Image: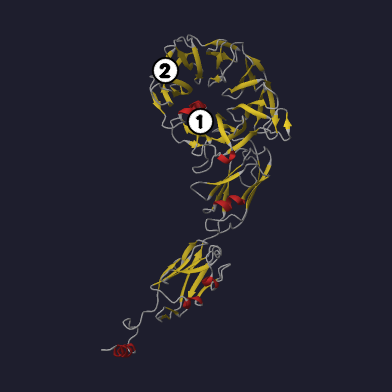
Protein backbone atom coordinates (compact mmCIF):
# COMPACT_ATOMS: atom_id res chain seq x y z
CA UNK A 1 0.00 0.00 0.00
CA UNK A 2 1.37 3.41 -1.00
CA UNK A 3 1.77 6.49 1.18
CA UNK A 4 -1.37 8.14 -0.22
CA UNK A 5 -3.49 5.09 0.62
CA UNK A 6 -2.06 4.95 4.13
CA UNK A 7 -2.84 8.62 4.68
CA UNK A 8 -6.39 8.16 3.42
CA UNK A 9 -6.89 5.24 5.75
CA UNK A 10 -5.66 7.34 8.67
CA UNK A 11 -8.10 10.10 7.80
CA UNK A 12 -11.02 7.68 7.71
CA UNK A 13 -10.13 5.97 10.95
CA UNK A 14 -9.20 9.30 12.53
CA UNK A 15 -12.70 10.60 11.85
CA UNK A 16 -14.07 7.82 14.04
CA UNK A 17 -11.68 7.75 17.04
CA UNK A 18 -9.51 10.60 18.41
CA UNK A 19 -6.67 10.80 19.24
CA UNK A 20 -4.77 8.18 17.28
CA UNK A 21 -1.04 8.61 17.91
CA UNK A 22 -0.06 6.37 15.05
CA UNK A 23 -1.28 9.09 12.71
CA UNK A 24 -0.87 12.37 14.76
CA UNK A 25 1.70 13.36 17.44
CA UNK A 26 0.14 13.77 20.89
CA UNK A 27 -0.32 17.38 22.06
CA UNK A 28 2.35 18.57 24.51
CA UNK A 29 1.52 17.89 28.14
CA UNK A 30 2.90 19.51 31.31
CA UNK A 31 4.92 16.86 33.13
CA UNK A 32 6.27 18.87 36.09
CA UNK A 33 5.93 22.25 37.77
CA UNK A 34 8.49 23.93 40.06
CA UNK A 35 7.37 25.26 42.50
CA UNK A 36 4.68 22.61 42.67
CA UNK A 37 1.00 23.47 42.68
CA UNK A 38 -0.11 24.71 46.13
CA UNK A 39 3.48 24.87 47.39
CA UNK A 40 4.13 27.18 50.32
CA UNK A 41 7.07 29.11 51.77
CA UNK A 42 8.52 29.65 48.29
CA UNK A 43 11.71 31.75 48.25
CA UNK A 44 11.56 35.26 46.81
CA UNK A 45 14.02 34.45 44.02
CA UNK A 46 12.87 30.87 43.36
CA UNK A 47 12.86 30.16 39.59
CA UNK A 48 9.60 29.03 37.99
CA UNK A 49 10.06 25.96 35.81
CA UNK A 50 7.51 24.33 33.48
CA UNK A 51 8.52 20.95 32.05
CA UNK A 52 6.66 19.43 29.05
CA UNK A 53 6.76 15.84 27.98
CA UNK A 54 8.44 16.84 24.70
CA UNK A 55 9.72 19.90 22.88
CA UNK A 56 7.19 22.56 21.96
CA UNK A 57 6.80 25.55 19.70
CA UNK A 58 8.28 28.27 21.93
CA UNK A 59 6.40 31.03 20.15
CA UNK A 60 3.09 29.42 21.09
CA UNK A 61 3.78 30.08 24.77
CA UNK A 62 4.66 33.78 24.68
CA UNK A 63 1.15 35.22 24.69
CA UNK A 64 -0.37 32.37 26.70
CA UNK A 65 1.70 32.43 29.95
CA UNK A 66 0.20 34.68 32.62
CA UNK A 67 0.74 35.40 36.32
CA UNK A 68 -1.49 37.16 38.83
CA UNK A 69 -0.68 39.33 40.64
CA UNK A 70 2.18 40.59 38.45
CA UNK A 71 5.69 40.00 39.73
CA UNK A 72 7.07 43.42 40.80
CA UNK A 73 9.52 44.63 38.17
CA UNK A 74 8.88 41.75 35.76
CA UNK A 75 7.08 42.07 32.41
CA UNK A 76 6.38 38.45 31.67
CA UNK A 77 6.04 38.86 27.89
CA UNK A 78 9.22 40.96 27.68
CA UNK A 79 11.04 38.27 29.67
CA UNK A 80 10.85 35.94 26.62
CA UNK A 81 13.29 38.17 24.71
CA UNK A 82 15.34 39.50 27.64
CA UNK A 83 19.11 38.98 27.57
CA UNK A 84 21.23 37.22 30.14
CA UNK A 85 21.62 39.27 33.29
CA UNK A 86 18.22 40.93 32.93
CA UNK A 87 16.20 41.24 36.16
CA UNK A 88 13.56 38.92 34.73
CA UNK A 89 14.26 36.46 31.92
CA UNK A 90 12.74 33.30 30.40
CA UNK A 91 15.07 30.68 28.98
CA UNK A 92 14.56 27.25 27.40
CA UNK A 93 16.30 23.92 27.55
CA UNK A 94 18.07 22.95 24.28
CA UNK A 95 15.27 20.58 23.26
CA UNK A 96 12.55 23.14 23.99
CA UNK A 97 10.84 20.98 26.61
CA UNK A 98 11.63 23.07 29.73
CA UNK A 99 10.81 26.74 30.26
CA UNK A 100 12.53 28.56 33.15
CA UNK A 101 11.62 31.98 34.50
CA UNK A 102 14.59 33.51 36.39
CA UNK A 103 13.78 36.71 38.29
CA UNK A 104 16.59 37.39 40.75
CA UNK A 105 16.28 41.09 39.97
CA UNK A 106 12.48 41.08 40.30
CA UNK A 107 11.60 39.25 43.48
CA UNK A 108 8.28 37.77 44.48
CA UNK A 109 6.45 39.84 47.05
CA UNK A 110 6.52 38.23 50.50
CA UNK A 111 3.61 36.14 51.83
CA UNK A 112 1.79 36.37 48.49
CA UNK A 113 -0.14 33.74 46.54
CA UNK A 114 0.80 33.81 42.85
CA UNK A 115 -1.47 32.21 40.28
CA UNK A 116 0.10 31.08 37.01
CA UNK A 117 -1.90 30.05 33.96
CA UNK A 118 -1.19 28.67 30.52
CA UNK A 119 -3.99 29.35 28.06
CA UNK A 120 -5.11 26.79 25.46
CA UNK A 121 -3.19 26.74 22.21
CA UNK A 122 0.29 25.66 23.23
CA UNK A 123 1.60 23.44 20.45
CA UNK A 124 4.64 21.57 19.30
CA UNK A 125 6.63 21.77 16.09
CA UNK A 126 4.44 19.11 14.45
CA UNK A 127 1.28 21.13 14.93
CA UNK A 128 -0.19 19.17 17.84
CA UNK A 129 -1.98 21.64 20.14
CA UNK A 130 -2.90 21.38 23.82
CA UNK A 131 -6.42 22.73 24.10
CA UNK A 132 -6.59 22.69 27.89
CA UNK A 133 -6.48 25.72 30.17
CA UNK A 134 -3.86 25.13 32.90
CA UNK A 135 -3.90 26.89 36.29
CA UNK A 136 -1.63 26.44 39.33
CA UNK A 137 -0.55 28.55 42.29
CA UNK A 138 1.92 28.75 45.17
CA UNK A 139 2.53 31.04 48.15
CA UNK A 140 5.79 32.84 48.88
CA UNK A 141 7.65 32.98 52.17
CA UNK A 142 7.17 35.80 54.62
CA UNK A 143 9.70 38.60 54.67
CA UNK A 144 12.57 38.11 57.13
CA UNK A 145 12.22 39.77 60.49
CA UNK A 146 14.36 40.59 63.52
CA UNK A 147 13.61 38.00 66.19
CA UNK A 148 15.73 39.42 68.96
CA UNK A 149 18.49 41.78 70.09
CA UNK A 150 20.85 40.83 72.90
CA UNK A 151 20.84 44.49 73.94
CA UNK A 152 17.16 45.35 73.79
CA UNK A 153 15.38 48.65 73.73
CA UNK A 154 15.43 50.34 77.11
CA UNK A 155 18.28 48.29 78.62
CA UNK A 156 20.13 50.36 81.21
CA UNK A 157 23.14 48.20 82.10
CA UNK A 158 24.56 46.90 78.81
CA UNK A 159 28.10 45.60 79.27
CA UNK A 160 30.69 47.91 77.71
CA UNK A 161 32.82 45.01 76.45
CA UNK A 162 30.09 42.64 75.27
CA UNK A 163 29.23 41.86 71.66
CA UNK A 164 25.71 42.69 70.46
CA UNK A 165 23.80 39.83 68.85
CA UNK A 166 21.02 40.29 66.29
CA UNK A 167 18.86 37.22 65.62
CA UNK A 168 16.75 36.96 62.46
CA UNK A 169 13.87 34.70 61.48
CA UNK A 170 15.82 33.12 58.64
CA UNK A 171 19.28 32.93 57.09
CA UNK A 172 20.40 36.35 55.87
CA UNK A 173 22.73 37.62 53.16
CA UNK A 174 26.01 38.39 54.92
CA UNK A 175 26.99 41.50 52.94
CA UNK A 176 23.68 43.39 52.96
CA UNK A 177 22.88 42.44 56.53
CA UNK A 178 26.27 43.39 57.98
CA UNK A 179 25.96 46.77 56.23
CA UNK A 180 22.45 47.27 57.63
CA UNK A 181 23.47 46.86 61.30
CA UNK A 182 24.92 49.99 62.90
CA UNK A 183 25.68 51.51 66.27
CA UNK A 184 25.49 55.19 67.12
CA UNK A 185 27.50 57.02 68.32
CA UNK A 186 30.00 55.38 66.01
CA UNK A 187 32.74 53.25 67.60
CA UNK A 188 35.99 53.06 65.56
CA UNK A 189 36.92 49.59 64.38
CA UNK A 190 33.44 48.11 64.83
CA UNK A 191 32.70 44.97 62.79
CA UNK A 192 29.53 42.99 62.07
CA UNK A 193 30.10 39.28 61.48
CA UNK A 194 27.70 36.43 60.71
CA UNK A 195 27.83 33.24 62.74
CA UNK A 196 29.85 30.76 60.69
CA UNK A 197 27.22 28.02 60.77
CA UNK A 198 24.04 30.01 61.32
CA UNK A 199 23.45 33.01 59.07
CA UNK A 200 20.32 33.95 61.00
CA UNK A 201 22.66 35.18 63.76
CA UNK A 202 24.88 38.25 63.37
CA UNK A 203 27.29 39.68 65.93
CA UNK A 204 28.26 43.36 66.22
CA UNK A 205 31.72 43.71 67.74
CA UNK A 206 32.58 47.24 68.94
CA UNK A 207 36.18 48.07 68.04
CA UNK A 208 36.69 49.75 71.41
CA UNK A 209 35.05 49.49 74.81
CA UNK A 210 31.78 51.39 74.89
CA UNK A 211 31.72 54.39 77.18
CA UNK A 212 30.22 53.65 80.60
CA UNK A 213 26.84 55.12 81.53
CA UNK A 214 26.40 56.33 77.95
CA UNK A 215 23.45 56.13 75.58
CA UNK A 216 23.73 54.20 72.31
CA UNK A 217 21.34 53.33 69.50
CA UNK A 218 21.44 50.02 67.64
CA UNK A 219 19.73 50.06 64.25
CA UNK A 220 18.92 47.23 61.87
CA UNK A 221 17.67 48.85 58.67
CA UNK A 222 15.36 47.34 56.05
CA UNK A 223 18.26 47.12 53.60
CA UNK A 224 19.15 43.80 55.24
CA UNK A 225 18.04 40.97 52.95
CA UNK A 226 17.72 37.26 53.38
CA UNK A 227 19.74 34.81 51.31
CA UNK A 228 17.13 35.08 48.54
CA UNK A 229 17.28 38.88 48.38
CA UNK A 230 14.03 39.57 50.27
CA UNK A 231 14.34 42.78 52.35
CA UNK A 232 13.61 42.87 56.05
CA UNK A 233 9.91 43.36 56.85
CA UNK A 234 10.64 46.30 59.14
CA UNK A 235 13.58 48.07 60.71
CA UNK A 236 14.53 47.41 64.32
CA UNK A 237 15.85 50.07 66.68
CA UNK A 238 17.07 49.71 70.27
CA UNK A 239 18.08 52.59 72.53
CA UNK A 240 20.18 51.43 75.48
CA UNK A 241 22.47 52.70 78.21
CA UNK A 242 25.76 51.08 79.18
CA UNK A 243 26.80 49.89 82.59
CA UNK A 244 30.17 48.36 83.44
CA UNK A 245 32.41 45.51 82.33
CA UNK A 246 31.37 41.90 82.00
CA UNK A 247 32.40 39.81 85.00
CA UNK A 248 33.20 36.11 84.99
CA UNK A 249 34.33 34.07 83.14
CA UNK A 250 37.06 36.62 82.44
CA UNK A 251 39.13 38.04 79.60
CA UNK A 252 42.39 37.67 77.74
CA UNK A 253 44.67 40.66 77.23
CA UNK A 254 46.65 40.73 73.97
CA UNK A 255 49.55 43.07 73.30
CA UNK A 256 50.05 44.00 69.64
CA UNK A 257 53.03 45.30 67.70
CA UNK A 258 53.04 46.91 64.28
CA UNK A 259 55.74 46.01 61.79
CA UNK A 260 59.04 47.58 62.79
CA UNK A 261 57.70 49.12 66.01
CA UNK A 262 57.54 48.37 69.69
CA UNK A 263 54.06 47.34 71.01
CA UNK A 264 51.47 50.10 70.61
CA UNK A 265 48.05 48.48 71.05
CA UNK A 266 46.22 46.42 73.67
CA UNK A 267 43.19 44.22 72.95
CA UNK A 268 40.72 42.84 75.47
CA UNK A 269 39.09 39.62 74.25
CA UNK A 270 36.57 37.19 75.63
CA UNK A 271 37.71 33.67 76.54
CA UNK A 272 35.95 32.31 73.47
CA UNK A 273 32.87 32.78 71.31
CA UNK A 274 29.52 33.44 72.94
CA UNK A 275 28.07 30.62 70.85
CA UNK A 276 29.64 28.09 68.54
CA UNK A 277 30.39 29.78 65.23
CA UNK A 278 30.37 33.33 66.66
CA UNK A 279 33.44 35.54 66.34
CA UNK A 280 35.32 36.17 69.56
CA UNK A 281 34.67 39.63 70.98
CA UNK A 282 37.84 41.74 70.96
CA UNK A 283 38.02 45.45 71.69
CA UNK A 284 40.95 47.86 71.67
CA UNK A 285 41.36 49.16 75.21
CA UNK A 286 44.61 51.03 74.71
CA UNK A 287 46.24 52.55 71.64
CA UNK A 288 49.46 54.52 71.73
CA UNK A 289 49.34 58.15 70.55
CA UNK A 290 51.26 59.05 67.41
CA UNK A 291 53.11 62.15 66.38
CA UNK A 292 50.85 64.42 64.35
CA UNK A 293 53.46 66.99 63.41
CA UNK A 294 56.81 66.85 61.64
CA UNK A 295 58.73 66.02 64.79
CA UNK A 296 57.82 65.13 68.39
CA UNK A 297 61.14 65.13 70.16
CA UNK A 298 62.93 62.13 68.68
CA UNK A 299 59.71 60.66 67.22
CA UNK A 300 59.07 61.28 63.53
CA UNK A 301 55.68 62.24 62.11
CA UNK A 302 53.30 59.26 62.29
CA UNK A 303 55.52 57.35 64.73
CA UNK A 304 54.25 56.44 68.20
CA UNK A 305 55.16 58.88 70.95
CA UNK A 306 54.58 56.16 73.55
CA UNK A 307 54.96 52.37 73.43
CA UNK A 308 54.00 49.64 75.89
CA UNK A 309 56.62 47.45 77.51
CA UNK A 310 54.14 45.35 79.49
CA UNK A 311 50.46 45.16 80.42
CA UNK A 312 48.63 43.25 83.15
CA UNK A 313 44.87 43.01 83.68
CA UNK A 314 43.55 42.74 87.22
CA UNK A 315 41.79 39.42 87.92
CA UNK A 316 38.51 41.27 88.48
CA UNK A 317 38.88 42.82 85.02
CA UNK A 318 38.49 46.38 86.26
CA UNK A 319 42.01 47.82 85.97
CA UNK A 320 44.92 47.67 83.59
CA UNK A 321 48.51 48.07 84.72
CA UNK A 322 50.63 49.26 81.82
CA UNK A 323 54.32 50.09 81.53
CA UNK A 324 54.71 52.99 79.10
CA UNK A 325 57.95 53.96 77.37
CA UNK A 326 58.41 57.55 76.20
CA UNK A 327 59.54 57.53 72.57
CA UNK A 328 60.05 61.29 72.33
CA UNK A 329 63.20 61.32 74.47
CA UNK A 330 66.69 60.29 73.56
CA UNK A 331 68.01 57.10 75.15
CA UNK A 332 67.64 56.05 77.83
CA UNK A 333 63.90 56.26 77.18
CA UNK A 334 62.05 56.74 80.48
CA UNK A 335 59.51 54.20 81.73
CA UNK A 336 56.41 54.85 83.80
CA UNK A 337 53.83 52.53 85.36
CA UNK A 338 50.18 53.52 84.99
CA UNK A 339 46.88 52.23 86.32
CA UNK A 340 43.95 52.61 83.94
CA UNK A 341 40.35 52.15 85.05
CA UNK A 342 38.84 50.30 82.10
CA UNK A 343 35.27 51.37 82.81
CA UNK A 344 36.00 55.10 83.01
CA UNK A 345 39.35 55.41 81.22
CA UNK A 346 40.88 57.21 84.22
CA UNK A 347 44.69 57.08 84.04
CA UNK A 348 46.79 57.21 87.23
CA UNK A 349 50.58 57.30 87.23
CA UNK A 350 51.81 54.80 89.82
CA UNK A 351 55.56 55.32 89.53
CA UNK A 352 58.09 56.80 87.18
CA UNK A 353 60.49 54.00 86.34
CA UNK A 354 57.95 51.39 87.45
CA UNK A 355 57.93 48.08 85.56
CA UNK A 356 57.27 44.30 85.86
CA UNK A 357 53.71 44.68 87.26
CA UNK A 358 51.86 41.71 88.78
CA UNK A 359 48.36 41.60 90.29
CA UNK A 360 47.39 39.65 93.39
CA UNK A 361 44.58 37.15 92.69
CA UNK A 362 42.17 39.19 94.83
CA UNK A 363 42.92 42.30 92.68
CA UNK A 364 43.63 44.34 95.79
CA UNK A 365 47.44 44.53 95.46
CA UNK A 366 49.87 45.34 92.65
CA UNK A 367 53.49 44.27 92.93
CA UNK A 368 56.05 46.01 90.73
CA UNK A 369 59.68 47.05 90.50
CA UNK A 370 61.38 50.42 90.64
CA UNK A 371 65.13 50.22 90.31
CA UNK A 372 66.30 47.50 92.72
CA UNK A 373 63.22 47.81 94.93
CA UNK A 374 60.10 45.64 94.89
CA UNK A 375 57.02 47.63 95.84
CA UNK A 376 53.46 46.70 96.74
CA UNK A 377 50.58 49.05 96.05
CA UNK A 378 47.29 48.48 97.88
CA UNK A 379 44.20 49.41 95.90
CA UNK A 380 42.01 49.42 98.99
CA UNK A 381 43.72 52.24 100.88
CA UNK A 382 46.22 53.57 98.32
CA UNK A 383 49.21 52.55 100.44
CA UNK A 384 52.41 51.97 98.48
CA UNK A 385 55.43 50.48 100.25
CA UNK A 386 58.72 48.76 99.45
CA UNK A 387 59.54 45.25 100.56
CA UNK A 388 62.88 44.79 102.32
CA UNK A 389 65.76 45.32 99.91
CA UNK A 390 67.31 42.46 98.01
CA UNK A 391 68.43 41.59 94.52
CA UNK A 392 66.41 43.21 91.70
CA UNK A 393 63.56 41.54 89.87
CA UNK A 394 64.14 40.01 86.44
CA UNK A 395 60.49 39.05 85.74
CA UNK A 396 57.11 39.87 87.31
CA UNK A 397 56.42 38.60 90.85
CA UNK A 398 54.24 35.51 91.25
CA UNK A 399 51.43 35.35 93.84
CA UNK A 400 49.91 32.45 95.74
CA UNK A 401 46.22 31.88 95.11
CA UNK A 402 45.28 33.35 98.48
CA UNK A 403 47.24 36.58 97.76
CA UNK A 404 49.28 36.11 100.95
CA UNK A 405 52.67 35.11 99.52
CA UNK A 406 54.75 36.47 96.65
CA UNK A 407 57.61 34.68 94.88
CA UNK A 408 60.21 37.09 93.52
CA UNK A 409 62.37 36.00 90.54
CA UNK A 410 65.61 37.99 91.06
CA UNK A 411 69.23 38.04 89.93
CA UNK A 412 72.30 38.76 92.03
CA UNK A 413 75.30 40.92 91.15
CA UNK A 414 77.12 37.91 89.71
CA UNK A 415 74.23 37.27 87.30
CA UNK A 416 72.92 34.20 89.12
CA UNK A 417 69.12 33.87 89.10
CA UNK A 418 67.38 32.86 92.29
CA UNK A 419 64.05 33.28 94.05
CA UNK A 420 63.02 35.19 97.16
CA UNK A 421 59.72 34.89 98.97
CA UNK A 422 57.78 37.73 100.57
CA UNK A 423 54.72 38.36 102.71
CA UNK A 424 53.21 41.76 101.87
CA UNK A 425 51.05 41.65 104.97
CA UNK A 426 54.03 41.13 107.26
CA UNK A 427 56.33 43.16 105.00
CA UNK A 428 59.07 40.54 105.16
CA UNK A 429 61.30 39.00 102.50
CA UNK A 430 63.37 35.81 102.71
CA UNK A 431 65.16 33.29 100.46
CA UNK A 432 63.67 29.96 99.39
CA UNK A 433 64.47 27.55 102.20
CA UNK A 434 66.71 24.50 101.76
CA UNK A 435 67.38 24.92 98.04
CA UNK A 436 70.41 26.76 96.74
CA UNK A 437 71.86 27.23 93.31
CA UNK A 438 70.25 28.79 90.28
CA UNK A 439 66.47 29.07 90.65
CA UNK A 440 63.85 30.55 88.30
CA UNK A 441 60.25 30.36 87.12
CA UNK A 442 58.54 30.04 90.51
CA UNK A 443 54.83 29.16 90.91
CA UNK A 444 52.84 28.89 94.14
CA UNK A 445 49.81 26.78 94.89
CA UNK A 446 46.46 28.15 96.10
CA UNK A 447 47.28 28.46 99.81
CA UNK A 448 50.98 29.21 99.38
CA UNK A 449 52.12 26.02 101.08
CA UNK A 450 53.96 24.60 98.04
CA UNK A 451 56.44 26.29 95.73
CA UNK A 452 57.41 24.77 92.37
CA UNK A 453 60.39 26.21 90.52
CA UNK A 454 63.03 25.45 87.95
CA UNK A 455 66.31 24.42 89.55
CA UNK A 456 69.46 24.36 87.46
CA UNK A 457 72.57 22.57 88.70
CA UNK A 458 75.76 21.30 87.04
CA UNK A 459 74.29 17.79 87.14
CA UNK A 460 71.02 18.72 85.43
CA UNK A 461 67.88 20.78 85.68
CA UNK A 462 64.20 20.24 86.34
CA UNK A 463 61.22 21.24 88.42
CA UNK A 464 61.50 20.96 92.19
CA UNK A 465 58.91 21.26 94.93
CA UNK A 466 59.53 23.08 98.19
CA UNK A 467 57.08 22.78 101.05
CA UNK A 468 56.43 26.04 102.86
CA UNK A 469 54.74 26.67 106.25
CA UNK A 470 55.27 23.04 107.24
CA UNK A 471 57.83 21.12 109.21
CA UNK A 472 58.83 19.11 106.16
CA UNK A 473 60.90 21.57 104.14
CA UNK A 474 63.00 19.00 102.24
CA UNK A 475 62.86 19.89 98.53
CA UNK A 476 61.73 17.16 96.13
CA UNK A 477 62.46 16.84 92.45
CA UNK A 478 59.22 16.58 90.49
CA UNK A 479 60.68 15.91 87.06
CA UNK A 480 63.58 16.56 84.73
CA UNK A 481 63.47 18.89 81.74
CA UNK A 482 60.41 20.67 83.15
CA UNK A 483 59.71 24.39 83.61
CA UNK A 484 56.63 25.01 85.78
CA UNK A 485 53.88 27.37 84.61
CA UNK A 486 51.15 27.07 87.24
CA UNK A 487 49.39 24.82 89.72
CA UNK A 488 46.20 23.47 88.15
CA UNK A 489 45.22 22.11 91.58
CA UNK A 490 47.00 20.92 94.70
CA UNK A 491 48.13 17.74 92.93
CA UNK A 492 48.76 18.98 89.36
CA UNK A 493 51.36 21.30 87.86
CA UNK A 494 51.16 22.61 84.29
CA UNK A 495 54.66 22.81 82.85
CA UNK A 496 56.74 23.09 79.69
CA UNK A 497 58.70 19.94 78.97
CA UNK A 498 61.95 20.37 77.06
CA UNK A 499 63.47 16.90 76.71
CA UNK A 500 67.04 16.74 75.50
CA UNK A 501 66.20 14.07 72.91
CA UNK A 502 62.60 14.95 72.04
CA UNK A 503 60.14 17.65 71.07
CA UNK A 504 59.22 20.27 73.67
CA UNK A 505 55.56 20.75 74.61
CA UNK A 506 53.02 21.45 77.33
CA UNK A 507 52.45 18.80 79.99
CA UNK A 508 50.49 18.16 83.17
CA UNK A 509 52.51 16.69 86.01
CA UNK A 510 50.95 14.83 88.94
CA UNK A 511 52.56 16.05 92.17
CA UNK A 512 52.00 12.83 94.13
CA UNK A 513 53.75 10.46 91.71
CA UNK A 514 55.48 12.66 89.12
CA UNK A 515 53.46 11.23 86.22
CA UNK A 516 53.82 13.41 83.10
CA UNK A 517 51.11 13.61 80.42
CA UNK A 518 51.54 15.63 77.24
CA UNK A 519 48.70 17.97 76.18
CA UNK A 520 47.33 17.05 72.74
CA UNK A 521 47.23 20.69 71.57
CA UNK A 522 49.35 23.71 72.23
CA UNK A 523 51.86 26.12 70.73
CA UNK A 524 54.79 25.29 68.54
CA UNK A 525 58.09 24.85 70.33
CA UNK A 526 59.14 28.35 69.30
CA UNK A 527 56.10 29.84 71.05
CA UNK A 528 56.19 27.92 74.34
CA UNK A 529 57.63 30.94 76.14
CA UNK A 530 54.42 32.86 75.31
CA UNK A 531 52.10 30.58 77.33
CA UNK A 532 49.91 32.24 79.98
CA UNK A 533 47.78 30.30 82.45
CA UNK A 534 44.30 31.34 83.55
CA UNK A 535 43.31 31.49 87.23
CA UNK A 536 42.65 27.93 88.46
CA UNK A 537 44.56 26.81 85.33
CA UNK A 538 41.41 25.87 83.45
CA UNK A 539 42.69 27.42 80.23
CA UNK A 540 45.98 28.32 78.58
CA UNK A 541 46.65 31.12 76.11
CA UNK A 542 49.60 31.37 73.75
CA UNK A 543 50.79 32.86 70.47
CA UNK A 544 50.72 31.06 67.14
CA UNK A 545 51.60 32.08 63.60
CA UNK A 546 48.71 31.36 61.21
CA UNK A 547 48.79 30.19 57.60
CA UNK A 548 49.10 33.80 56.38
CA UNK A 549 52.13 34.45 58.58
CA UNK A 550 50.33 36.61 61.16
CA UNK A 551 50.90 35.91 64.86
CA UNK A 552 47.53 35.38 66.57
CA UNK A 553 46.47 34.78 70.18
CA UNK A 554 45.06 31.31 70.82
CA UNK A 555 43.31 29.78 73.84
CA UNK A 556 42.97 26.10 74.72
CA UNK A 557 41.49 24.17 77.63
CA UNK A 558 44.02 22.97 80.17
CA UNK A 559 43.52 19.39 78.98
CA UNK A 560 44.47 20.44 75.45
CA UNK A 561 40.95 20.42 74.02
CA UNK A 562 39.09 23.05 72.01
CA UNK A 563 41.86 25.34 70.73
CA UNK A 564 40.29 28.65 69.63
CA UNK A 565 41.87 31.63 67.91
CA UNK A 566 41.03 34.80 69.83
CA UNK A 567 42.27 37.42 67.38
CA UNK A 568 41.49 37.98 63.70
CA UNK A 569 44.53 39.99 62.67
CA UNK A 570 45.04 40.12 58.91
CA UNK A 571 48.22 40.81 56.92
CA UNK A 572 46.74 44.15 55.87
CA UNK A 573 46.48 45.18 59.55
CA UNK A 574 50.30 44.95 59.79
CA UNK A 575 50.02 43.92 63.44
CA UNK A 576 51.19 40.79 65.25
CA UNK A 577 50.30 39.62 68.74
CA UNK A 578 53.40 39.69 70.96
CA UNK A 579 52.06 38.74 74.41
CA UNK A 580 48.93 37.33 76.05
CA UNK A 581 47.70 37.30 79.62
CA UNK A 582 44.56 36.55 81.60
CA UNK A 583 42.42 38.77 83.77
CA UNK A 584 38.90 39.08 85.12
Q: Position of residue 418 (x, y in %)?
A: 52, 13
Q: Is residue 252 above or below residue 392?
A: below
- The residue at the point 57 percent across, 35 percent down is 269
Q: Nearer the viewer, mark 2 or mark 1?
A: 1
539 or 28: nearer the viewer: 28
Q: Position of residue 320 (x, y in %)?
A: 63, 28
The percent position of residue 64, horizontal first and vertical second, equals 49, 77
- Residue at image position (50%, 61%) is 43
Pointer 2 local density, CA inside 10 Å: few below 14, some 14–19, many at least 20: many
Tag of residue 379: none
Residue 542 numbered mark, or none: 1
Viewer-proximal residue among 489 and 180: 180
Nearer-N-terminus badge (2/1) = 2
Compute the Cα span from label 2 to label 1.
24 Å
Q: Quadrant of the N terminus?
A: bottom left
| SS under mark 1 | strand
Mark 2 element type: strand
Residue 261 visible in rendering: yes
Q: Which residue is mark 2?
A: 478
Label 1 neighbourhood size at 10 Å, few (<14), some (14-19), many (20+)?
many
Q: Is residue 570 visible?
A: no
User: Is residue 401 rendered to the left or right of residue 482?
Assistant: right
Amino acid sequence: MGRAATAARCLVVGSLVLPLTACFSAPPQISALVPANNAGNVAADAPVRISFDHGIDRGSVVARLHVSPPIPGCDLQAAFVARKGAPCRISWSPDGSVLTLDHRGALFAPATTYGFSLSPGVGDSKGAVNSLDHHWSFTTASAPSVRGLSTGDGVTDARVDAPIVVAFSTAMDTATTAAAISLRPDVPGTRVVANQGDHSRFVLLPGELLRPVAQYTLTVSRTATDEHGQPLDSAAVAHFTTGGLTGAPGHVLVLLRANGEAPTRVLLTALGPGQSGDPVAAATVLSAPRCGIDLCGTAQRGAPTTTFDAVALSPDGQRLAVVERDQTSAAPQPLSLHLIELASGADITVADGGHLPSWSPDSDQLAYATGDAVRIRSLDDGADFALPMGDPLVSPPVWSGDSATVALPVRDAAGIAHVDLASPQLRIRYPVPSLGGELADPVLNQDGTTLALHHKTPSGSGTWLVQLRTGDAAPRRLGADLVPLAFADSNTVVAVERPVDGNPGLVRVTVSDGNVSRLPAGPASSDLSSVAVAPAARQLAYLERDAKGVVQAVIVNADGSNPTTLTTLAPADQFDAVAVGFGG
